[in-house]
Amino acid sequence: MLVSAQEMLEKAVAGHYAIGAFNLNNLEWTKAVLKGAQESNAPVIVQVSEGAGKYMGGFKTIADLVKDLIESQGITVPVALHLDHGTYAGCQKCIKAGFSSIMFDGSSLPFEENEAKTRELVAACKALGMSIEAEVGAIGGEEDGVVGMGECADPDECKKIADLGVTMLAAGIGNIHGVYPEGWPGLRFDVLEAIKAKTGDMPLVLHGGSGIPDEMVQQAIRNGVAKINVNTECQIAFAKATRAYIEAGKDQKGKGFDPRKLLADGTQAITDMVKYKIEVFGSKDKA
Ligand code: 13P
């Protein structure tokens, strides 16, 4: 059974730790993340972008897959299934498909429109017992080879969106999706503190969780971050282990073609990364 992310996030804020939110890409990924969370006895958020939703065969397929794996793999830790960076239409689709949580990313819209659409989706989620994440301030990332630095959130806008009754709030604080560029100045703790001062116990979300030094992540958790998104580091771990398997000739020098064997080391590398991140975030044994 899927759960809303609300209770796990409230407990994380009270206990000063963060819940890992790991992006999914395929069947192996989904099994690997659930396994890592179970072995760590940690609550977990599994999430998909709209692109991954298409790749994996649609939101309904994903909701069924995650629910069925929870049962078949004996997963007993709390699992929330969340849409990452949803459009308004994507949010509606995931509500219908049986997700337990959504993110509406209206950060690129004029603020009033972000506010109005978030308000509407908050009402829809509340009625269904689902959790909802909103975003203020753009999170940087790579587009066409150029890494954008993003735009720090305005603490007053954060308060306005928090007051709409969202479950969690993503706020740009100098974080970037993907690999951090050389010379990245680090997270803006002054901005994070100003947001925390305005939003109180609202669980804050750190996107772009890959590649931020562990101590910096832990400082962010002390300042109110309760959900941390990780995608790129799992992808790198998967690719590296899969490549190493082939380069070591374990694929019988190209003659081995059983996908279960080819992907086994990469899949285990995802589980190992999930377990490592859960330790850093402090959510081990919090299920
Ligand atoms: P990374 O790929 O940098 O870990 O970011 C993941 C993320 O924030 C997804 O929304």
Image (tube, rainbow, N blue to C red):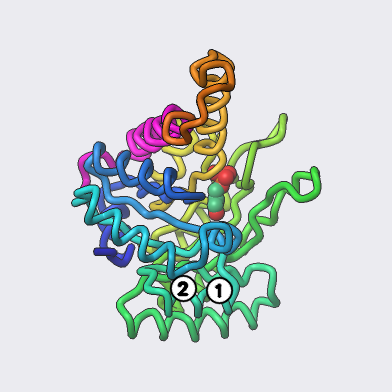
Q: Is residue 96 left or right of residue 183?
A: left
Residue at the spot 72% in from the left edge and 30% down from the top edge: 182
Q: Is residue 172 left or right of residue 37?
A: right
Q: Which secondary structure lies at badge 1? A: helix
Residue at the spot 69% in from the left edge and 49% down from the top edge: 141
Q: Amino acid at mark 1?
A: Gly
Q: Is residue 101 left or right of residue 155?
A: left
The disc at residue 212 is none
Tell me where the magenta segment starts and ends, as one range.
Answer: 263-287
Q: Residue furthest top?
A: 248
Which residue occupies the foreground of this view, 108 or 81?
81
Q: Amino acid at mark 2?
A: Cys
Q: Position of residue 187 (x, y in %)?
A: 58, 42
Of the 4 image quadrants, the one containing the N terminus is: bottom left
Residue at the spot 52% in from the left edge and 44% down from the top edge: 231
Q: Which residue is mark 2?
A: 94
The disc at residue 90 is 1
Which residue occupies the foreground of this view, 25 or 236?
25
Q: Magenta stretch: dominant SS?
A: helix
